[in-house]
Image: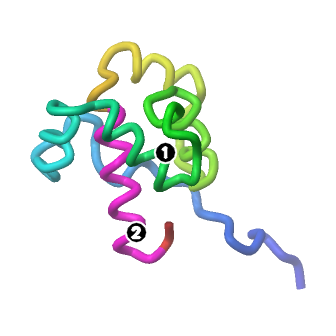
Amino acid sequence: MAVTNQPGSYQPSDFQTGLCDCCDDCGTCCYALCCLPCLGCSIASDMDECCLCGLTVLMRSVYRTKYNINGSLCNDYMTYMCCGMCAVCQLKRDIDRRKEQGIF
């Protein structure tokens, strides 16, 4: 019998919400509008990282790699450059959904 998936690995997928799906979670978007650095710290805390890392392209890339979410470092960079606040909110929404699903 051959093992095709490593234990704890995830099937390739996309983020669970779109980049501009702010209406899916207005609270997160309002949080970002009021205090983006605080939201970044919340993301970093969720991922057991330094608070200063929460708003970085690398945080998104690490998360995407961990959960086998489709994309690339270049795509992460362009997403942050074009719409950083939306990228941060999308990441937080995905973390929250994975927590609800028990897979975070």
Residue located at (35% from left, 48% from top)? 92
Amino acid tagged 1: Ala
Who comes first in sequence, dot 2 or dot 1? 1
Q: Which mark is residue 18?
A: none
Please give the residue where the numbered disc 2 appears in the rendered image: 99
Which secondary structure, mark 2? helix
Q: Which residues are magenta?
A: 87-102
In the figure, 46 relative to 50: above or below?
below
Left or right position of 49 against 8: left
Q: CA distance from mark 2 to mark 1?
A: 15 Å
Q: Nearer the viewer, mark 2 or mark 1?
A: 1
The reply to whether the magenta stretch includes residue 98 is yes
Which residue is at 53% across, 43% downward?
Answer: 70
Query: What residue sits right under mark 1 in the picture?
Result: 44
Task: Verify CB contact (< 8 Å) between mark 2 and mark 1.
Answer: no
| Residue at the image point whose x is 57% and y is 55% from the top | 67
